[in-house]
Amino acid sequence: MAKQHSHSSFNPVHLALITLGVAIYTFGFVKFNMANHLAEGGLAGLTLIIYNLFGIDPAYTSFLFNLPLFVMGARVFGRRSLYLTIYGTVTMSIFIWIWQKVPLVIDLKHDILVAALLAGMFAGLGSGLVFRYGATTGGGDIIGRLVEEKTGRQIGQTLLMVDAVVLTLSLTYIDLNHMVYTLIASFVFSQVLTMVEKGGYSVRGMLIISKASEQIAATILSEINRGVTYLNGSGAYSGKDVKVLYVALNPSEVLIVKDIVAEQDPDAFVSVLNVEEVVSSDFKIRRKNFDKEV
C-alpha cells in the first residue's frame, strides 16, 4: 500500500533552506547592522535598541521577547506554521550568538551606504528563503496575525505601525544620518525579499475583450506559442455574450500581445494584471517556440 504523506510533515530540504536563510539574515544583522549602528524595524530593531542602550545581547532578548508571542500566537497559527515559526526564531537566536563569536570583521572603510546596501541585501535574501519555505522569525509577524484576528486590521498595516514606532525609538541611539541609511537598507530589503520569496518570478496576466477574440487567440498561439483560455462573459449594458481571453505571459511578451490586439481589433478592451504565481506544468516563463527556445 502506498505511503500517505501528511501535509503537516516537515521536508528536510525545506528545513535546511530555512536554516540557511536564517544564517544569511543573522550574518547581515550582526556584521552590518550591529557593526555599523544601523537600526531595523520590528522586534529585531527593538533588540538593537536594548543592545545599544543597555548592552544586552540580541541573541537573548530576541528569544525572550518571542516566548510570550508563541503562547499568544498558538491559536491563530496552524500547528505546522507555529512549529516552523518557533524553529525559525530559536535558530535566529542561535545564529546571532554564533556570528558574534566568529572573529570576522568586514572593513567597509567607514562607508555607511555600502553597509546599508549589504544589510538590506542579506536581510532580504535570508528572510526571502525563510518565508518562501513556510517559516517566519516571529516578532512582528505574530503580532500582526493577532491584531488581524482581534480587529480585522490587515497585517501589513500593523507591521508598518510597529516598524514606525521601533524606528522612531531607534533615534535614542542613532542620529538622523544613520536613520536615512537605515531606510535605504529597508528599501533594499523589501525589493530583495520579494524577488527571493517569489524565486525571481515575474508574470503578467492579460484579459482581452474583443469581437475578434478567435483571431486574436489564434495569432497569440501561432506567434508566441502561449496558451489562451476562453472565459464566458456578458456585457452589463449591451447584454451580449462575449468570449473573454485570458493569457499568462512573461513581461517581455506583453507589448507583443498588445500589438496583436491592436492590429486585430483597435477597439478591444485590454487589462494587464500582475500575477503572483502560476502553477502549471505547461507554463514556463521562457516558452519554447516550435523550432527553438526564445
Image (cartoon, helix red, strand yellow):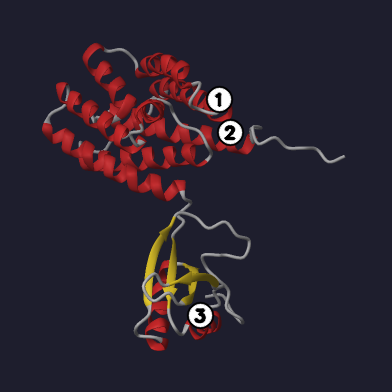
**Circle 3: element type:** helix
Q: Is residue 219 left or right of residue 109?
A: right
Mark-to-mark CA distance, 3 and 1: 46 Å
- Between residues 28 and 91, which one lies in front from this camera angle? 91
Mark 2 crowd level (few <14, some 14–19, many ≥20, 10 Å Cα): some
At x 34% / y 15%, what residue is drawn? 57
**Quadrant of res 40:** top left
Percent coordinates x, y for residue 259 in the rendering: 38, 82
Amino acid type, label 2: Leu
Q: Which mark is residue 83?
A: 1
In percent of width and height, residue 277 lies at: 49, 55
Q: Quadrant of residue 58?
A: top left
Disc nearer the start of the sequence (1/2): 2
Q: Which residue is under mark 2?
A: 15
Furthest residue in direction right, as rendered: 1
Of tags 1 and 2, which is closer to the observer? 1
Task: Give the number of the mark in front: 2 or 3.
Answer: 3
Note whether 65 is above or below 113 in the view shown.
above
Q: Residue at x 59, y 38 (%)?
A: 14
Q: Which residue is mark 3?
A: 220
Q: Quadrant of the image for the N terminus?
A: top right
Q: Amino acid at mark 1?
A: Tyr
**Amino acid under label 3?**
Ile
Count the labels in the image: 3
Name the N-terminal-most of marks 3 and 1: 1
Q: CA distance from mark 2 to mark 3?
A: 42 Å
Q: Residue at x 41, y 71 (%)?
A: 252
Name the residue nearer the viewer: 1 or 64.
Answer: 1
Query: Label 2's element?
Result: helix
Q: Position of residue 271 (x, y in %)?
A: 37, 69
